[in-house]
Image (cartoon, rainbow, N blue to C red):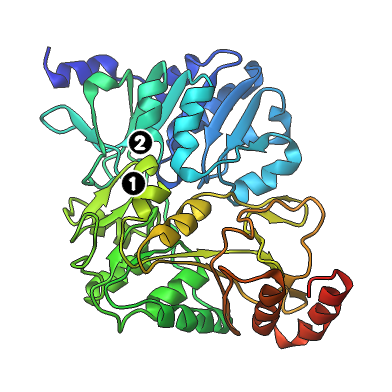
Amino acid sequence: MTFQDEYKQKHITAEEAAAKVENYSTIVAAMAASEPPALLRALANRGPELQGVRVCTCLLMRNYDFMEEDMAGHILNESWFFGPWERKAFQNRTVTHLPNNLHEAGIKKAEKDSVDFFWGTATPMNQEGYFSLSLGVTYEKTMIQKASFTVLEINENLPWTHGDTRVHISEVDGIVENDEELVEMPPAEPSAAEERIGEHIANLVQDGATIQLGIGGIPNAIAQNLKDKKDLGVHTEMFTDGMVDLVEAGVITGEQKTLWPGKMVGTFALGTRRLYNFIHNNPSIEFQQGHVTNDPCVIGKNNGMVSINTALQVDLTGQVVSEWLEGQQFSGTGGQADTHRGAQRASGGLGIIALRSTAKKGKISTITSQHPAGAQITLGRQDVDVVVTEHGVAFLKGMSVRERVKRLIAIAHPDFRERLKWEADKFLLW
């Protein structure tokens, strides 16, 4: 039998794949831009006739009917990382959070839980019988090995990517074809405060450093302010459009990288068609599984590693809340703890937490004396290295609580500094 014959034999429709799901099955779906929309829509259509089905996802990019209120009891979405759709569905009791550190999310799920189905996306098959998992291998390959039945949704719009992304037809049980337009996330335009944060952080990044960036106004501002640097490298969980800008500006070369010199290394990509075109068949882009890219011990082998993550709130002792807002799950830990800890293992490394000093149009200070009751801590104070707002930089590692209080108040918004001093006295923080 040829690879093409095997492909034809395994070809099914999304409806036929969803029909294999039984009550109390567990499905794991690929994350973010790699999610399989035809399969997930087909599952939603079956929802009313199912009971106790769990579908594990990470940062869904589309809204699916299986998260509607009437799906409670039929299908439960277990999410490693909330986006806007999961936040909306949280009140429906059709979504729950899967706490994790990204480097072990897939590994621990495979070890501790049953996985009946894995549903992912891939490029069309090549002549040797291989697909590329394209935009993400965070946990996808682990799940292909673990799942009882694997279905790949083939999309000709997906870029072929290099690294540990190949899957052979022999590893796949079902093939669904769906040439849907790829989901895109345009870069957010930085605010004035975010621009100042970007300037502060750029001053901390030395020529030849290896960087990790995320997505949003602050990371975009940082990327814009790095354009006078030389020979930067990339070891990240997420490839973004801002990195393309830095490559085209001649800033990212990877020539001084310790690991994978000359290559940008990450585990998934999310951005615009420009980014997807850039990574297509690009040998300088290396996708590795999340348990590799986000292992703090691996990250720490990059000399001059600088990890830059964002937060929602930091208290005066240094505890960071990045995933909890107004009494409910907002996002997830993702790779923040991994990369922040890993960077500090590196020779000359820095772990940076960035946030605007206020929220709700200046009405609330994000530097606070105490986090609200029930807030979920993403980084403990013992882990936190450097905190940056538009008002400056606070180096916290090795500092006492009393010194941390002084340094964090100094980078809080001026309108809230006297109040924070009063609260620091009240709670015996200094």
Q: From the viewer's side, name the closer residue of 159 and 307.
A: 307
At x 22% / y 52%, what residue is drawn? Answer: 280
At x 29% / y 43%, what residue is drawn? Answer: 134
Q: In the picture provided, is 92 more to the left or to the right than 292?
A: right
Secondary structure of residue under mark 1: loop
Q: Is residue 84 visible?
A: yes
Residue 152 in which image quadrant: top left
Q: Is residue 182 visible?
A: no
Q: From the viewer's side, name the closer residue of 330 and 65.
A: 330
Q: Is residue 103 above or below residue 1?
A: below
* Front tag of 1 and 2: 1
Residue tagged by mark 1? 135
Q: Amino acid at mark 2?
A: Thr
Label 1 – label 2 distance at C-alpha:
9 Å
Where in the figure is residue 241, as x and y percent of width and height?
36, 65
Packing grade of label 2 (10 A; few <14, some 14-19, many >=20) is many
Packing grade of label 1 (10 A; few <14, some 14-19, many >=20) is many
Q: Is residue 406 above or below residue 327?
A: below
Q: Is residue 139 above or below residue 277?
A: above
Where in the figure is residue 231, as x and y percent of width and height?
23, 73
Q: From the viewer's side, name the closer residue of 281 and 219.
A: 219
Where in the figure is residue 331, as x and y percent of width and height?
60, 51
Tell me the tag on residue 121.
2
Kindly indicate whether the residue at mark 2 contacts the one at mark 1 (C-beta within 8 angstroms). yes
Whichever of callouts 1 and 2 sits on the residue coming sooner in the sequence is 2
Secondary structure of residue under mark 2: strand
Which quarter shows the N terminus?
A: top left
Q: In the picture provided, is 190 more to the left or to the right than 346?
A: right
